[in-house]
Image (cartoon, helix red, strand yellow):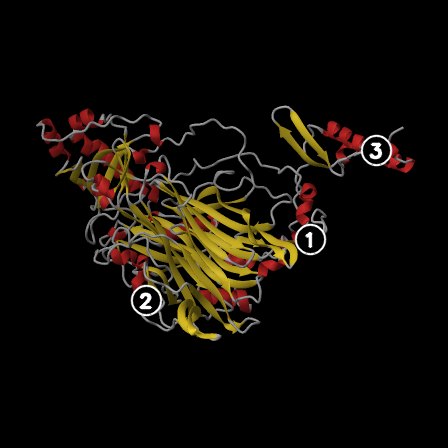
Amino acid sequence: MFPVLNPSSCSLNRLRAAGNSTLEVTPEGSHSLLCLCGCSNMNLKTVLILLVLALATIFALVCVLLTRGVKPASCEPQTLSTLQGNHSDQSLVFADLTPEEMVQVVRYLQSSLGVPLVDAYNANPSDNCIYYIDVQLPTKAEVLGFLDRGGKRPSRQALAVVYFGNQPDPNVTEYVVGPLPTPTTHQDITVQKYGGKLPYHRRPVLGKEYEQIEIFLRKEAFSTAPTFLSQVLDYDGTNFASLTSAPRGFQSGDRNTWFILFHNVSGFFLHPVGLEVLVDHSSLDVSQWRVSKVFFNGQYYGDLVQLEREFKQGHVKVDPVKRAPPDGGFSSMQPRAAPRAPFPLQYEPHGPRYSVQNNQVVSRAWSFAFGVNVNTGMRLFDIRFKGERIVYEISVQDAISVYGSNCPGGMSTRYMDGSFGIGRFTYPLVRGVDCPYSATYVDTCYLIETQTPEKHKNSICIFEENTGSPLRRHYSNLQSLYYGGLTNSALVLRSIATLGNYDYVWDFLFYENGAIEAKVHATGYMTSSFLYGDGLDYGNKVGDHTLGTIHTHSIHYKVDLDVGGTYNTLVAHDMAFESVQAPWSPEHQIQRPRLTKTVLDTEDKAAFRLHSNMPRYIYFAANSENKWGHQRGYRIQIVSFTGEHLPETSLMERAISWGRYKLAVTKRKEEEPTSSSIYNQNDPWTPTVAFADFINNESIVTEDLVAWITTGFLHIPHAEDIPNTVTVGNGVSILLRPYNYYDTDPSIYSPDGVFFSSEQDSSVCEVNHIACLSKTASCLPVLPPFTYDGFQNLTRL
């Protein structure tokens, strides 16, 4: 009688479908049995051995047959107790405001400012309203006193930005409100922060103002040209969409905006109709708004009345534009192929090897606090590798796009995305596309243009990524035979902001060798102009009447490195060739590279123009040395292919003067917290913050330093950008890499490393843990149900 074999105990090494019907089965432990010449002369012992092997093979085959169709076990998550033990509520010193705190600040302002406050969602330009509320972070000295020296926890405060339109001197005022959670005081910090009052014309445009402009165009302006709009553009009162340009004029105080009109279909950014309207909305009285110029198909008119009159007289050159189909046709993102086999999925066999608690992420090697500024987006604080702080702050400062076109809306556009709100337009992420399906998702909350907090669910994701390539490896076939390597796994923090047509994928990656990468990819729709005349001098034709217009993308980061302490010095290493006589053959010359070393001791020396030569190794040097006597450092490396910066002869260039420099290192100052301002977009001619003023030749030797880094790319849209620009090739980044900071590569201590020699059996788990994956990773990930909340709580733009 044979013993009963438990099918669940069988381990299958390989099941591979061949064609539609063949199944190759190789049970673990099975052997190939070869019988060559002379098999008939076997002794009894040999026969018994063969019989046992045959029985084992039969048992294995029975096991396969019995378990065919049985699902592998579900992956069991590992305990995170060790990681959670490293969390600290000290990270809350950097935390974004909670919805409850936001509500308390609103109530306090309503009862304490002494003026009526209208909900910004419904506010007219002539009303008072709260524009936004965000956290007011403590000073660095306060924070480090608390984190490092056991000092008192800094009081928690909020920053409130209020529009005062209903008073004789309209202005924008910024208040610090606190302490939270129950505020009792507020302080006007506007003059202290900006050196003067904030004129009202600098205020960002509210969604309500855009809505009022749309109503003005539809009900008043368009009604003056019914024949032209109907016969030429097939306008029916509903089938136009508009896109704002910015800035809004040519001098301080202007609020004149070109609105580009498109067919109101899916992907409308690719369907310009050729009509653009300049609206003067500078008056706080909406009834005083007017059309000050009209553009159609290469010609300018005083208003739509003149365009209508000249059209009826036959003086307007028309090229009738067919109405686009409702799905947009070529602009539709609807897939052109049906789904087939699932795409590759990433999963964690034993659950995540990191932990997220409150606003802190902790992994085996890394820890950091994170948050989202409503204007500038992602920001990280107190980044530590193996317990040592490397970075105090790394944050997005702004993103700009400068467009070219032969149409007025396109040629005048210089978008400063921070003014529109990179953080506020960070929407829910789609599992399995925007981030790995099994990533950890975090909600974000904002209070902007409303008196009630809004939540964007699952708008940040955290995951560990296997890049599919080794972080390091070597195969040795000289002297000794061995292989050593380490898979490149990175901890990733991601958010995606959609600003009108463009989507920006913001990543922060943390590698096992102590390197940090801040990366951004651009995708989404290009914006376009109507193609006419010399349009091809400004881009490529991508539709019957569609010009994909040339433009630049520039992104600015603030990086407050604290390498081996708060005080650092900036050092540059590079190479130069020198000619020397060969010592063993003096009649011959050798050109050899040698190391060059320079201390960049002033801010002027540390400011590198965008396309100038820059030393290839620039690093923050600590006041300590590694085992080999070198200053411990972290190197800054920039991956970028930016276009040209706006000429400094432009009257608005100072507002984006950070774009002059690929890298500028300055002495850190609390009064220079950001390189840009939300008020620069609508008054770039008198910028509220001009980064160029930060650089004033101060000493930066053994000081608390900040690196301001520009990265970006030139985009010349082309046919393959239809319907969307892809992320491949459209990603740029900055890297912070250890440079003599350690004594060896710290990734050598990673438990993911692999090593085996020719004298070892690499298929044995004790020698090579990769050989155990058939046992340790043969499980099905437990995938949560798919949900998406991205179509709730939408903000007008």
Mark 2–mark 1 Cα distance, whole angstroms, equals 58 Å
Q: Are marks 2 and 1 in contact (CB under 8 Å)?
A: no
Query: 10 or 660, which lies in front?
Result: 10
Locate the N terminus by quadrant.
top right
Q: Nearer the viewer, mark 2 or mark 1?
A: 1
Q: Nearer the viewer, mark 2 or mark 3?
A: 3
For mark 2, what is the residue?
695
For mark 3, what is the residue?
39
Q: Looking at numbered disc 1 in the image, what kind of residue is underneath it?
A: Ser
For mark 1, what is the residue?
758
The quadrant where residue 587 appears? bottom left
Q: Is residue 328 among the parts visible in the rendering?
A: no
Mark 3–mark 1 Cα distance, whole angstroms, equals 34 Å
Q: Is residue 61 above or below residue 186?
A: above
The quadrant where residue 82 appears? bottom right
Q: Residue at x 44, y 61 (%)?
A: 636
